[in-house]
Amino acid sequence: MSKKALVVYYSQSVGNTKRHAEQVAEVTGADIARIETAEPYPTDFNLMADQAKHEVDEGIEPELKPLDKDVADYDVIIVGTPVWWYTMAPAMRSWLNSVDFTGKILVPFVTSGGWEGDVVEEIEGTAKGAEIDCPMDIVYQDQDSKIRVTTDREINMWLADLRDLLG
């Protein structure tokens, strides 16, 4: 690949975002780094959800552990986040606000169990200086839901677009 790429993702519980971040890294040959909060979320799901909802509602950006990769070393940054209450995870917002993406191509992908909201647009508005390309919403379905689910074919087409983008 002619462009050097880095996958940066935040994933908390189910691991859908992590799984797709790893898939992207494997298919494209990109390096990968996980965003982690300095103070881990509670392991109890209900307590974690309460804290996360509070952070979303109040616009809190949690402190993060440093990444082991430097964005300056890459041409393309592929970022993945779950959708929490129709927005990106607060940890992703913290990270995006801490990086200057001038001259970088940013490829956002979001995972959700329903409606992805305007998260891709929020990422675009938050990532200072980034050129957005190849965004992807990956939607999973609840058992009783009538929501349209992203198919494996659509994900594979997106992965092919990423390979083309990286040259």
Image (tube, helix red, strand yellow):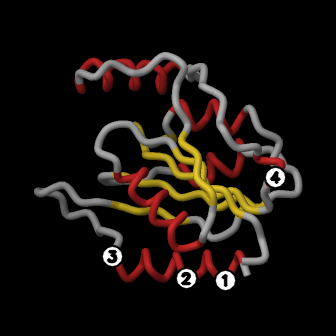
At horizontal 53% and vertical 58% (from top left) the residue drawn is: 109
Say which of 154 and 148 sits in front: 154
Residue furthest toward the left?
A: 144
Which image quadrant for residue 83? top left
User: Cα distance, mark 1 to mark 3?
Assistant: 20 Å
Residue at point 48%, 27% (across, down): 56
Q: Residue at x 29, y 44 (%)?
A: 14
- Which amino acid lies under the numbered mark 1 shown in the image of this protein? Asp
Image quarter where the N terminus lies is bottom right
Viewer-proximal residue, 161 or 74? 74
Say which residue label 2 marks: 160
Tag 1 residue: 164
SS at circle 3: loop
User: For the residue marked with disc 4, what is the amino acid?
Assistant: Asp
Q: Nearer the viewer, mark 1 or mark 4?
A: 4
Q: Is residue 15 above or below residue 6?
A: above
Decide which of tag 1 and tag 4 comes sooner along the chain: 4
CA distance separating discs 2 and 1 = 6 Å
Q: Around disc 2, counting alpha carbons within 10 Å, would you say few (fewer than 14), some (14 to 19), or many (20 or more)?
A: few
Of the numbered discs 4 and 2, the one sitting upstream in the chain is 4
Q: Position of residue 160 (x, y in %)?
A: 55, 82
Q: Which residue is mark 3?
A: 151
Nearest to viewer (mark 4 / mark 2): 4
Residue 72 is left or right of residue 34, and the answer is right
Q: Looking at the image, is 52 positioned above or below residue 86?
A: above
User: In screen coordinates, is 108 left or right of 10?
Assistant: right
How crowded pointer 3 is (Cα within 10 Å; few <14, some 14-19, many 20+) is rated as few
Could you tell me the amino acid type at mark 3?
Thr
* Position in image of residue 129 (x %, y %): 84, 50
**Contact, mark 4 vs mark 2 (Cβ under 8 Å):** no
